[in-house]
Image: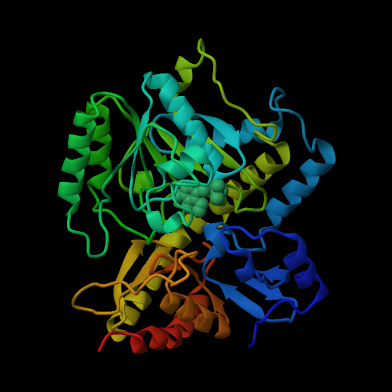
Amino acid sequence: ANRQSGRNEIERLDREYTLGTWTRQRDFDPTQIVDTNGPRIVTADGDSILDFSSQYVCTSLGYDAERVSDAVAEQIRTVPYVNPGWATEPRARLSEKLAEITPGPLKKTFYSTSGTEANEAAFKIARAYTGKHKILSRYRSYHGATAASLSASGDPRRVAQGPEIQPEVPGMVKGPDPYAYGSSLDPDESLEYIDEMLKLEGGTVAAVLVEPLVGSNGVLTPPDDYLPRLQEIAHDHGALLICDEVMTGFGRTGEWFASALYDAEPDIITMAKGLTGSYQPLAATTVTEEIAEYFEDTLLNQGHTFAGHPTACAAGVAAIETYEEEGLVENAREMGQYLKSKLDSLAERHPSVGERRGVGLHQGLELTKSTDERVPFEQREDKVSSTTTVLDEVGARALDNGVYFYTSVNTIVVTPPLTITRDEVDEAVDALDDALRLSDAAMDE
Ligand code: PMP
């Protein structure tokens, strides 16, 4: 199907009056979505698209989670909003639930409305608690869009406007990643490097911040013992471990949280996206009882008008009940195995697939233009996007075949909703199989 947009009134209005995110406005030309069902979105032209991205790895429940929409509707009619100084049933129930499903001694939750803010709150909490100010994050990471969280995000390919325009906030230091395609450090060496950095920073680091499984910078999977070892190293130097589970939380990896998958017990977990299945905007920063205890007598110097918004919290409670009752975390594990085997066979058949990586329904295929050398395709010439021309072409072809994938940093990210079935996996893999012929054809001789 030809999906050129800008044809109907809504697309024209949207183009005219909305500033698009993360894009040169010339390239902002969105297609109108008028309906959804299951894992599919429907365009104004009536095209039904199977969504294998869960949008931004958000809509983990698909679009038919009635329990969540009902809970939202009911809450809007009773107590749509009060400021965070009042208690509401949804917030109290959600906080209790989060204490139950998060790993280790995590207990109390601070609320906000985006993953970015959840990380900003984590930094403030870690700084106040430790009395230190630096945050150590890693290069291949994304933690958010505002000053401190963006400064903690390491990949220069994600920051189109350079430091001349968006200077980093002070106190952000960066270490190496556990693994990167073609990287020269192995995971052991990268941990030693971080250990050394913490030593050299001389006890000024409040927290080490990581995505347990790197998401939008290319689905990087660490070895099983990496995260517990990193936790030990951080603690040895008096720093906290913050796990950014904005993308990996809520069953995506086949466990409620990726930290639990790797047997780590972070001091702080940040989350958003899957928390409500994105039926409402809601984010959370959950801390251990010990950290929470510290703020009994110390000011918690952070807050937002919409913190713990009752309607959003009602969506959160209903979303967690839906994951539980429909066995979606187990489905992510099972379907993840199936998806993984199908993607492995794509990787075998297509020379331009350098590597499949991932756990559960958090999978990715990294492309290469030369199999032996592990060389990524070149970044787009206009450099305003974190994708490559070849990657964009593969994504566009898959979309023509009726399946939408999120593409980022030379990687096709494969993250369907947790409700996904075998037939839908087959449908998506067939669409991708065809699209990958384009990247095969674009390889070096
Ligand atoms: N952390 C991670 C790991 C993310 O993937 C994202 C968003 N993709 C964020 C933080 C920022 O979340 P938000 O866009 O809700 O601010």
Q: How is the image coloured?
A: rainbow
Q: Quadrant of the N terminus?
A: bottom right
Front residue of 130/339: it is 130
Residue 38 in view of the camera: no
Front residue of 6/165: it is 165
Q: Quadrant of the C terminus?
A: bottom left
Residue 373 location (% of width, % of height): 19, 74
Of all residues, the one furthest to the top in this rendering is 297
Front residue of 22/263: it is 22
Report the number of numbered marks: 0
Q: Is residue 239 above or below residue 246?
A: above
Q: Is residue 139 above or below residue 296?
A: below
- Residue 163 is left or right of residue 73, and the answer is left
Q: Residue at x 45, y 81 (%)?
A: 432
Q: Residue at x 47, y 37 (%)?
A: 148
Q: Residue at x 75, y 71 (%)?
A: 11
